[in-house]
Each structure stands twice: as C-alpha cells, then as structure tokens.
Image (cartoon, helix red, strand yellow):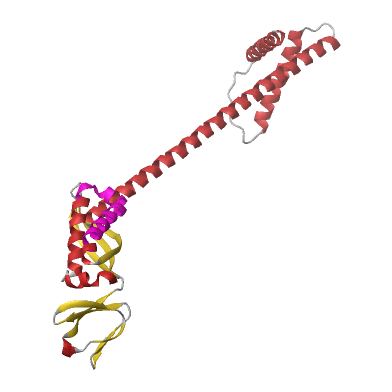
Amino acid sequence: MGNLCCCVQVDQSTVAIKETFGKFEDVLEPGCHFLPWCLGQQVAGYLSLRLQQLDVRCETKTKDNVFVNVVASIQYRALANNANDAFYKLSNTRSQIQAYVFDVIRASVPKLILDDVFEQKNEIAKAVEEELEKAMSAYGFEIVQTLIVDIEPDEHVKRAMNEINAAARMRLAANEKAEAEKILQIKRAEGEAEAKYLSGLGIARQRQAIVDGLRDSVLGFSVNVPGTTAKDVMDMVLVTQYFDTMKEIGASSKSSAVFIPHGPGAVRDVATQIRDGLLQGSFADQS
C-alpha cells in the first residue's frame, strides 16, 4: 500500500475505503488507484479480506456446579461487497465477537452437566456459530467456522474424574478376573468328577475281574481234585495270598508298618469276608 503523486496501491486480499471530503465514496479493489488529494479524495483506511481467527476463553458453570473454561475458536472474514459496513459499523470487531461468544456459552453450558458438556460440544459450537452469523452478517462479516477446541474443568475435578474412571476399570477387571477363576474352578471340578467317575469304573472292573478269577480258580480246582469243596479251595487260596502279603511287607525296606491280627482266627475272618464278597458278586452277575 502506498500513496505517491496521488496514486494509491492496494495489496492483494485487501480493500481500501475511499472518501471524498470525509464522506464514503467507494471501495477500492487491489491494484493502483489515482486519488487527487486536491479534490478531497483520500483513503480512510484498509480492510483485510483474509480469514482471521479469534480464540475466546470463557469461564462458566455447569448444571452440576462445576466451573469450567471453554475455549472457542472463531474463524471469520470481512465480505468484499459489504466492506463499507465492516469498516464503519464496528470499531472493535474482535471485542464484539467475543461478547457474543460469552453470551451464548454462558447461556448453553449451565443447562448441561459436566459429562454432557464434553459430549455435546459440537452442539454448543453450532449454537455459537448461528448466533454469530445472525449478528455479524449485519456488519459485513462472515462466520466461516466455530470450534470448541478445549473444555478445562478445575484440576481437582479432573483428578476426581480420572479416579472414578480408574475405579470403574479396576472393578471391571476384578469382575473379569473373578469370572475367569469361576470358569477355571468349574472346569477343574468337572475334570475331578470325570476322573473320579472313571476311577470308580476302573475299581469296579478290577474287583469284578478278581471275583471272576477267584471263582474260575475255585471251580477248576474242585473239578481237577475230587473230594474238595469250594470252601476248602477258597481257604487255601486265602492262606496263600495272606502269607504272600506278609512276605512282601517283610521284604520291602520302605514299606509302612501294618499291624494285623495274626493267627488262625484272623485267617478265618478274612476268608469269611472274601467268601461273602464272592457270593455278592455272583448274585450281582445273575441279576
């Protein structure tokens, strides 16, 4: 921009306000213009058409009585076809915009609780933009965009919010851990039940095989040795197994001490018990 020999230069993205004897006459576009000062023509001022940004920091209170600082970024520019209104009607554009932003934010945020302020910041920005567009269009300015760039509650409130969030996450982790332990215990119990069931089947089959073997031995011995009864054969088998057991206990150096009645009466009791078991097994097979 310059003024030499009644010539005025207007830079790009800028317009000049031309006055004649102090009265608005025209808007000068970028380029070189001839303004004879002797005829009362002069440049009253220049107006930038570039996009400008104003950051407004507003302190207000939410519905749940939490004080927050809301930072809004206003992007605006002057309109070339309304440059005279933008130049003459407002003496301080930034202060005017800031006043409207304060008014809208302090009317919107107190209706919301703190969590909703974070969630509805786009709605707040839209309300600010609509109010500014309606007000500033009469002064030759266009509101390009309005953004709520930051919401800052008090430091103690932020710490409390973080602690609440951490506690909720810890509670969720504890529930998940307890659920996992529950599943492990259920699976472990199911495994133990299945193992005990299979062990019971094995013991039952083992006992059945022992009974079947003893029965076959008694029957075979009775057939091959005439005159012997099943009771005689059974007593002999039991006495043989009894002495074999005693021999194994005495021969093993690491075996535990076992105290059992020793004598003919004890053998007779053992024989009676095994005989009863054989008879029960036989009845079970017949049934």
Q: Is residue 218 left or right of residue 262?
A: right
Q: Is residue 241 above or below residue 175?
A: above
Region in magenta: 110-136
Is residue 219 something that shows in the picture?
Answer: yes
Q: Is the magenta stretch mostly helix, strand or loop?
A: helix
> Which residue occupies the foreground of this view, 184 or 252?
184
User: Which quarter of the figure is the C terminus placed in?
Assistant: top right
> Would residue 111 be counted in the magenta stretch?
yes
Badge count: 0
Q: Is residue 252 above or below residue 245?
A: below
Image quadrant where residue 86 sits = bottom left
Q: Which residue lies furthest to the bottom in this view?
A: 5
> Which residue occupies the foreground of this view, 198 or 235?
198
Is residue 162 something that shows in the picture?
Answer: no
Image quadrant where residue 129 sits = bottom left
Q: Residue furthest front?
A: 39
> Would residue 71 be counted in the magenta stretch?
no
Q: Is residue 128 above or below residue 91?
A: above
User: Which quarter of the figure is the N terminus placed in?
Assistant: bottom left
Residue 202 placed where, x, y %? 66, 25
Q: In this view, does 131 lie above or below 268?
A: below
Image quadrant where residue 243 sits = top right
Residue 88 placed where, x, y %? 17, 72
Residue at 46% across / 35% down in the picture?
182
Residue at 31% across / 54% down in the picture?
122
Residue 90 placed where, x, y %? 17, 69
Q: Which residue lies furthest to the left in this view?
A: 22
> Which residue occupies the foreground of this view, 70 or 172?
70
